[in-house]
Amino acid sequence: MTARNVRGAAGAALATALITGITACSHPAAPASADSAVVGIANEPDSLSPLLGYGKDGNSKIFDGLLTHDADMKLRPALAEALPEVSADGRTYTFRLRRGVKFSDGEPFSAKDVEFTYRTILDPKTNNASRTELDAIESVTAQGPDRVVFTLKYPYAPFAERTVLPIAPEHIAGRQDVNSGEFTTRPVGTGPYVLTGWSKGEKLSFKANPGYWGGEPAVKNFTMAVIKDDDVRATRLRSGELDAAILPPNLARGFAKDSSRKTYAAKTFDYRNVTLPTHNPVTGDVAVRRALDIAVDRQAMVDKLLDDAGKAAYGPVPTDSRWFTPGTERPYDLERARQILDEAGWKTGEDGIRVKDGVRAAFPLWYTSGDKIRQDHALAFASDARKAGIEVKTEAGTWEVIEPRMKTDAVLAGGGSPADPDFDQYQLLTSSLAGDGFNNMARYDNPAVDRAVADGRTSGDPATRKAAYDTVQRELAQNPGYVFLTHIDHLYVVGDKWEGLTTQVEPHDHGLGSGPWWNVETWKPKQK
């Protein structure tokens, strides 16, 4: 949700959200050949080093992980030659590595690079905001050049999903300052593309890696143009300067009748929610939280703000996921919301705003400057809250302004990961992570949720895990720490000159590794 790549609601990767980014300073040249592609994205990372969090969810064009996801989000081997061998107690994962793989500088890849990558990320001196995602690891050990063993502190059910994390070369990154060295902007990996240039705020340029173990890509030159403004992105796509772009629904609709382009709608786990800080005298009241949770008209937000490109959200898990708990939907019910507040002693004042024990039912709600989707959601939430007698004052600011206020002020946040329910819920809801950067931004504290989240992440039994996450969702319906608003589809408009384009179910953080170009290395020129 910000350019620091820490996940919006749960503090994993602060990346700018859908429809945000850095404005392009100059235009890349128009696509000139059949083997090049220029795509317009809305954001860029601060670093291209996986040691600092880049590419942690997979699909990096520069790097590979031990495993990767296919189009159906199933794990498959990448730098590993097969899925891991897992011990009976679920605490030991053994990977056998693909042989003959080289980094793009020609140096061989080995198990030592895997050990180096994970150990460096786990080092407290490394500025990786996502370190807690790997806190189950007790040790990682290279056993020869093509075998690596992870030992976990406890059985962590989705650990294999964490190994899509890109592997860095020890012979380069290990000889630099991990936080500020040249590797952070001029990386070397084993992936299908080699970075040829990065003009921050403007574009990232890549060329095909001729020595890529998976075969040299047909798209020889690949450029990601960083364009913050939605209208500018659409204009440059229409003019032919871009082959593809991510666009909001209202602008994507303008290309619907263009026979030379196709629109791809990627389903996502990408949600927008409002944090309800427990340290605020208003939002700290469970009655207020319950009332707000049913005073918001989620479907109206989907219809009007997203132009139907999304769905109502009642928690981090989308309603069409196998992990969703039926019966935890919260219908819009303004009258019931008012009744809850009345019963809790929040009485309506002369100006229509409720008061209890001298405390006025008012609080600020921050959203990131320049983010139109978050602004629209914040304003809609404030409008609905006002009907229930609660005044929400919307404020725009940068994350540098917002972060120090998160203990007591509400935030229009975002998050979502399709890989596993633990990836959202552990960092979003665990009480011990309250106040830890962007983890548990609401400082939610619910012992029943803590126990269920722990059960869900440590059990290897699917039925036990499903029951645990059912408990979490039912508890959130009774005692919400956040008001979840919508899950947002990501829309991409792409020139119809390539074959092999698909989309995956996408996370909150997207742009470089998501979209129809998640597998650009497999695209082929369309036969005429």
Image (cartoon, rainbow, N blue to C red):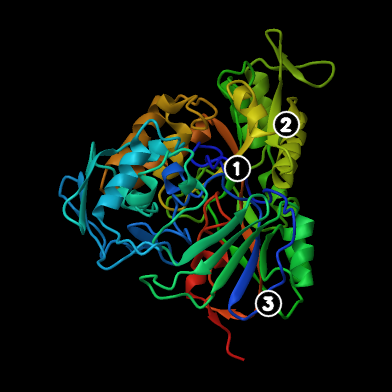
Q: What is the distance, in whole Å, between disc 3 and disc 2 at their CAs?
A: 52 Å
Q: Position of residue 73 (x, y in %)?
A: 42, 62
In this rendering, the answer to whether 282 lies above or below 294 is: above
Answer with the quarter of the image where residue 111 lies. bottom left
Residue at numbered disc 1: 3
Q: Position of residue 314 (x, y in %)?
A: 56, 43
Q: If you read the primary sequence from the N terminus, does the residue marked by circle 3 or circle 1 appear first?
A: 1
Counting labels gives 3
Which label lies toward us, 3 or 1?
A: 3
Q: What is the distance, in whole Å, between disc 3 and disc 1 at their CAs?
A: 30 Å
Which residue is at the front of the view, 258 or 384?
258
What's under tag 2, amino acid-wise? Answer: Ala
Residue at numbered disc 3: 32
* Residue at x-position 71% and y-position 51%: 228
Considering the image in quadrants, where does the N terminus appear?
top right
Q: What is the distance, in whole Å, between disc 2 and disc 1 at their CAs?
A: 30 Å
Look at the image and tell me whether residue 326 can be seen.
no
Label 1: which secondary element: loop
What's under tag 3, amino acid-wise? Answer: Ala
Q: Position of residue 238 (x, y in %)?
A: 77, 70
Which label lies toward us, 2 or 1?
A: 1
What's under tag 1, amino acid-wise? Answer: Ala
**Residue sitting farthest toward the top:** 358
Q: Position of residue 231 (x, y in %)?
A: 79, 57
Q: Tell me if 86 is positioned left or right of 292 in this view.
A: left
Residue at numbered disc 2: 385
* Residue at x-position 77% and y-position 35%: 383
Which label lies toward us, 3 or 2?
A: 3
Q: If you read the primary sequence from the N terminus, does the residue marked by circle 3 or circle 2 appear first?
A: 3
Label 2: which secondary element: helix
Considering the image in quadrants, where does the C terminus appear?
bottom right
Label 3: which secondary element: loop
